[in-house]
Amino acid sequence: MPAAPATTPRGATPEDPLPLRDAADRIAALLRDLPARWLEGQVTEVKPRPGATMAFLTLRDVTEDVSFSLVCHPRLVTAEDSPAAVGQRVVVLARPEFWRRRGQLMLRATEIRAVGLGDLLARLERLRRALAAEGLFDDERKQPLPFLPHAVGLITGRAGDARHDVIAHTRRRWPAVRLVIREVAVQGATAAAEVTAALQALATTPGVDVIVIARGGGSFEDLLPFSDETLLRAVADCRIPVVSAIGHEADTPLLDLVADRRASTPTDAARLIVPDAAAEAAALDRTMVGVRARVAALVAAEHRWLADVRSRPVLADPTALVGRERGRIAELRTRITLRARAMVDQETTAMAGLVGRLRALSPQATLDRGYAVVIRPADGAGSPPAAGPPRIIRDAAEVGIGEPLLIRVARGRLGVVVNEVLP
């Protein structure tokens, strides 16, 4: 059986456009089957209409610039205990709905509840544990604050005591301080996003080497933007030290844990970021007094030493030392000369004794007394001994008649021939 020819859906070509009504019907059909879901956001607008069968609200994400229009029964916004008030953080049970006539996507809410304090605390605790497990609160990753920053970046509200306190106390402590101020919303649905953007902008501003995020006190809900995860991670990633100055001592948003330093109040932030010029000047004065005293003591000690050296005889009369040393050298020369002569005389006497002993033992001395030495020459021949090297004759029996011999006397030698051998 042949396959059915493929058909092109309507709207795929300009020759066969899909009517707008059909497109609206299809979109509505797709959304009709989606289930209702609980959604969280902050109410930014409420439009109850007396006598109308519907009320309209605008719900915005608590951190991002995302909003939706909601439609609901009027009683959900007009009841005395209704949480649908501008600025309130709520959760709504809603499902998407497409308004065919206007081509508009709406959320139809059937239930609206305020986000309870317990719910918020539980969420913050889960976030705190997750960030702590990642090490974002560890002291090892916190950066030290500069002693004297080139410029201070300040993120604060557009008007308020916190802004005034930080600026006034910082300039009072160090009048020459340079402040780069970014004014943002510090509460409400856009606060976290604006603070994050300002932080990222200041982190790339030349000269800024410390950033302060400041806000005055407020309710727990007012301070929620400063526990926003996106903001916290931006602070953790910031290459410039960040000081958290949010609320009062008792207020502890999670920003206090991620920041490199926490100021108990915006006023205390000034103490952390710049030194006190008056205190530094006083400390410098004290240091200079100490340095002067130390230098004066050293100079006085050197003067005393110099006076002591100058008072010594060698410096009082420098030639005396030369004369004394010259005499000492002359004495040493005399002693050395006498000692050398004594040693020479002693060695001369010893040598004379040795010469005498040597002469007494010398064969020449024997010859000088009239004795002679009879020598058979090297080429001599005779009997009984055989010819050989020269040797001294000690026995007459060693010589034969007619044998030539040499006789050595004290001075000279005699050549003789043996005529007779006597016993």
Image (cartoon, helix red, strand yellow):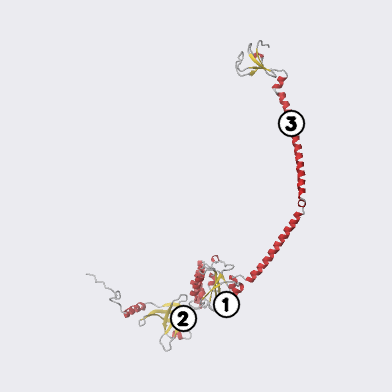
Q: What residue type is disc 2 on?
A: Thr
Q: Position of residue 286 (x, y in %)?
A: 68, 67
What residue lies at 72% left-to-right and 58% top-to-bottom? Answer: 302
Q: Which mark is in front, 2 or 3?
A: 3
In three-dimensional space, the C-alpha distance between marks 2 and 1, rounded to whole angstroms, equals: 28 Å
Could you tell me if residue 245 is visible in this image?
yes
Q: Which mark is in front, 3 or 1?
A: 3
Could you tell me if residue 126 is visible in this image?
no
Q: Position of residue 172 (x, y in %)?
A: 61, 74
Q: Which mark is in front, 2 or 1?
A: 1
N-terminal of the pair, mark 2 or mark 3, is: 2
| On screen, residue 80 above or below 13 | below
Q: Position of residue 307 (x, y in %)?
A: 75, 56
Residue to which mark 1 is pinned: 164
Q: Nearer the viewer, residue 88 or 399?
A: 399
**Residue lying furthest front:** 319
| On screen, residue 141 above or below 331 | below
Q: Nearer the viewer, residue 26 or 212?
A: 212
Residue 19 shown left or right of residue 367 in the figure: left
Q: Position of residue 325 (x, y in %)?
A: 76, 45
In three-dimensional space, the C-alpha distance between marks 2 and 3, rounded to whole angstroms, equals: 130 Å
Q: Which mark is residue 348?
A: 3
> Are the two marked residues, 3 and 1, in contact with CB atoms closer than 8 angstroms?
no
Q: What residue type is disc 1 on?
A: His
Packing grade of label 2 (10 A; few <14, some 14-19, many >=20) is: some
Q: Which mark is residue 44?
A: 2
What residue lies at 74% left-to-right and 36% top-to-bottom? Answer: 340
- Disc 3, SS: helix
In three-dimensional space, the C-alpha distance between marks 3 and 1, rounded to whole angstroms, equals: 111 Å
N-terminal of the pair, mark 3 or mark 1, is: 1
Q: Which mark is residue 373?
A: none
